Amino acid sequence: MSDESTAPESPAPSPTEALAELTSDKEWSADFSGANGRAAQKLAVERKSALLRGDQAEAAPNVPEHLAEAMENSETKPHAERYVPAQSPEDYKFDWRDAENVEHAKEMTALAQETAFAVGANPEFAQATVKHIQERLPRVQPGMSVAENEGSLDEAVARLMGAEAGATIAAATEAVMSMPENGRQWVQQTLRSLDPSSAAWFTARLARTHRAKRP
């Protein structure tokens, strides 16, 4: 007869397992999408961010080996420093000029932090990107957005990147697909709302961030 009091306890799920369990929960997903109101969405974002912090704490330092090596070389260090990713979502700081109120700004910050962290963006690089996008969006003239001009983004990327256009779009697409769903929707909507030249610039930044994680 076994003694249940001496039976080993089941190990607690790792942060990665806990995150997978959370994101598969339909009720949490509805809250995270905003379907149940802003307050519920805020709590859902905070729950996921807390798990992401735990997952990061468990993991090794979030610096690709090739970047770590480049940081040790005086010649390559200045360039490598521009692409060293954040160690935590809280490393990202953003200023939202178009936020409806303080709570909205907090929600946008949480969304941007999670999205930037998912793609491994450098904090300063991400902040500069968001700042420029916020400056460009109000200047888009009626009828001049990517959404209103089919094929304009591909054409603008081709003008900007030349022979590297195809590879740039592919890398940017991979970066977007690595984002959480809400972050992916936010970035895709932003690309559609920008003028083609600004959207091409944003696309190149996404591609650059994605490539920086590779040797």
Image (spheres, grey):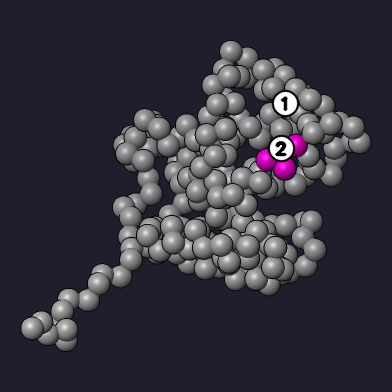
Q: Residues within 10 Å of mark 1 (few under 14, many from 20)?
A: many
- Viewer-nearest residue: 19 or 143: 19
Residue at the extreme front of the image, as rendered:
1
Q: Which residue is mark 1?
A: 153
Residue at x 75%, y 22% (from the top left corner): 151
Image quadrant holding the C terminus, namely top left
Residue type beneath disc 1:
Leu
Image quadrant holding the N terminus, namely bottom left
Marks 1 and 2 close (CB-CB < 8 Å):
yes
Q: Is residue 25 left or right of residue 30?
A: left
User: Which region is colored magenta?
Assistant: 188-192
Mark identifier at residue 211: none
**Between marks 1 and 2, how big is the CA–CA gap?**
9 Å
Q: Which residue is mark 2?
A: 191
The image position of residue 163, as x and y in percent, is 58, 13
Residue at x 78%, y 67% (from the top left corner): 101
